[in-house]
C-alpha cells in the first residue's frame, strides 16, 4: 500500500466511486467533531477525537473495492447495533457499500457518542 502525506492524498488515489463516499464520510465526521485532527494511521484516514489521541481514541475509514470501511470502535458498534443491523459489520467496524447512501444522522450520533466516551475516560 502506498504511503500518503494527507487524508486528501489518500482519497485522491482511490476510485472515483470511493472518492465520493470518502469525501462525504469525512465531511460527516468533521460536522460531528469539528475539532477532530486529521491524521493517517496504519496508512488510512484517521481522526483523533481528543488532542493527541492515541489509536483507540481515533476513528478511521478506508476504501475497499465495493465499500468504505468505517471504524468507530467496538463500544460504539455495540451501542448502535440495532441501527446498524442492515450493514455488514466486524468487531469494531461497519461497511458502507458504494451503492447505498451513507446514514448521515447515524454516523453523526456514532462519532459524538465515541467522542463523549473518550472524554469521560480521558480526564
Image (cartoon, rainbow, N blue to C red):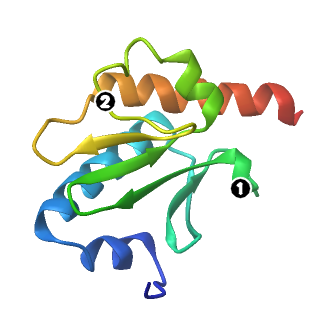
Q: Residue at x 58, y 27 (%)?
A: 76
Label ID, residue 55: 1
Across and down, in percent, residue 48 comes to: 63, 52
Residue most extreme to the top: 82
Relative depth, front residue between 62 and 40: 62
Image position of 47 (left or right of 61):
right
Above or below, 41 against 117 in this view is: below
- Secondary structure of the residue carrying tag 2 is loop
Which residue position is annotated with label 2?
Answer: 87
Across and down, in percent, residue 85 comes to: 35, 19
Q: Residue at x 49, y 39 (%)?
A: 90
Q: Are marks 2 and 1 in contact (CB under 8 Å)?
A: no
Q: Residue at x 49, y 41 (%)?
A: 93
Relative depth, front residue between 93 and 8: 93
Instruction: First in sequence, mark 2 or 1: give its number.
Output: 1
Q: Quadrant of the C terminus?
A: top right
Amino acid at each position: 500500500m502506498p504511503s500518503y502525506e494527507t487524508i486528501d492524498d489518500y482519497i485522491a488515489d482511490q476510485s472515483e466511486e470511493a472518492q465520493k463516499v470518502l469525501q462525504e464520510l469525512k465531511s460527516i465526521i468533521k460536522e460531528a467533531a469539528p475539532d477532530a485532527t486529521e491524521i493517517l494511521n496504519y496508512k488510512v484516514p484517521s481522526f483523533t477525537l481528543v488532542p493527541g489521541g492515541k489509536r483507540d481514541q481515533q476513528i478511521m475509514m478506508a476504501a475497499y473495492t465495493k465499500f468504505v470501511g468505517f471504524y468507530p470502535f467496538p463500544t460504539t458498534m455495540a451501542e448502535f447495533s440495532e441501527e446498524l443491523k442492515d450493514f455488514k459489520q466486524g468487531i469494531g467496524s461497519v461497511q458502507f457499500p458504494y451503492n447505498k447512501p451513507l446514514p448521515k444522522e447515524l454516523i453523526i450520533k456514532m462519532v459524538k457518542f465515541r467522542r463523549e466516551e473518550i472524554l469521560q475516560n480521558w480526564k
